[in-house]
Image: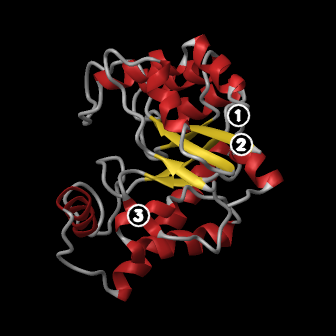
Amino acid sequence: MHGLIVNADDFGFSQEINEGVCEAHVNGIVTDASLLVRSPYASQAIRMASRISLPVGLHIDFVTPYSSSATQELGPNGHLTQELFNREFNHQVTSLFSTEELLKLQDEIRNQIEDFKALAGHTPSHLDYHFGLHFLPDVMFIYLMVSNQYQLPVRWGVQYAGRNPIVLAPARLCDRFRGVENSSIETFTDLLQEPWEGVLEVLCHPGYFTPNGLFDSYNQEREYELKTLTDPRLKAEIEHLGIQLVNYNWLKEHGNSN
C-alpha cells in the first residue's frame, strides 16, 4: 500500500496563507495542515479548517515572533534558535543544551499543545515543527517523549534523525517540494519516484501572497506551490500511480509499514 500525506505547513501565518491552504485542500491534494498556534490568525485558521473538514496538527514554533515565551532560549534571538539555524544552514555545532534548558523546551511543547486544545477544543491531528528541529537530536528526543505522552503521531525524517522506534509516524518524509514560477505537476510527481512502503509525507507551503507583515522570505513562492497543488492533473496522476491520499487521522487508525 502506498499512502500519501500532503501537509501544508505554516497554517495561521497570515490570512492569505490560511486562504491558500484551504484552497489547496478543497481544490487540490493537501490532506492535512499544521498550525502556528500563537499567531493572531490561528483562530481564523481553525474556523476555516472546521468548515472544510481539514485535519489540523500543531506546527511547533520556537523561532518566530509569534512564539512569545518568557524562556530566553526561544524566539528569534534565543539560544535555541541561533543554534538551530547554525546547524541547519552552516552545518556547525556550536553548543549543547543543558538539562535545565531541555526541560524548559519540554514545557514549551506541552504549553503549545495545551494552547491548541484551548483554541480548537481537541488535540492536534499530529505534531511537526517549524524549521529543521531534526538538526537538534536532544530536542527531538523531547519532542518524541511529549508526543508519546499525548498519544500523537509525528513528522519524522529518517534521513535526518535516524529510526524513530517510539511514536507513530509516516515511513518517509519528503521536504524537497518548492514553489518555482515555471513549476509543473512533474515538479511534484518526480518526488514520488523513490520507493517507499506505507505512508510518505510531503510537506508543502501553499498560500496567497501576503503583502504586509509577513516576516518570511518564502512569500511569492507559496502561490507557485498553490498553483501546482491545485492543478487537477496532479490528483489524476497520483491516482494513476496507485497512490492513496490520506491524512494523519487515517494514519492513527491504520498504522504504517516502515
Instruction: Inspect the image, locate mark 1, and give the three-letter code of the amino acid beneath it.
Output: Ile
- Give the residue furthest to the top: 232
> Which x, y percent locates residue 250?
77, 45
Instruction: Inspect the image, locate mark 3, and give the three-letter code of the amino acid beneath it.
Output: His
Alpha-carbon span between mark 2 and mark 3:
25 Å
Residue 187 in view (yes/no): yes
User: Which residue was labeled with disc 1?
Assistant: 243
Quarter placement of the C terminus: bottom right
Q: Nearer the viewer, mark 2 or mark 3?
A: 2
Instruction: Inspect the image, locate mark 2, and give the three-letter code of the amino acid beneath it.
Output: His
Residue 205: mark in rendering: none
Q: Is residue 162 above or below residue 204?
A: below
Q: Residue at the location (77% across, 45% down)? A: 1
Q: Residue at the location (63% across, 40% down)? A: 5
Label 2, residues with CA under 10 Å away: few <14, some 14-19, many ≥20: some
Nearest the eye: 256 or 130: 256
Helix, strand or loop status at disc 2: strand
Nearest the eye: 85 or 73: 85
Nearest the eye: 82 or 132: 132
Q: Are marks 1 and 2 in contact (CB under 8 Å)?
A: yes
Q: Residue at the location (67% across, 48% down)? A: 199
User: Which residue was labeled with disc 3?
Assistant: 134
- Give the residue furthest to the bottom: 99
Q: Is residue 245 above or below residue 118?
A: above
User: Which residue was labeled with disc 2?
Assistant: 2
Q: Is tag 1's residue or tag 2's residue first in the polypeptide sequence?
A: 2
Q: Is residue 169 above or below residue 42?
A: below
Q: Is tag 2's residue or tag 3's residue first in the polypeptide sequence?
A: 2
Alpha-carbon span between mark 1 and mark 3:
27 Å
Q: Tell me the colour scheme of the image.
A: secondary structure
- Give the residue furthest to the right: 253
Label 1, residues with CA under 10 Å away: few <14, some 14-19, many ≥20: some
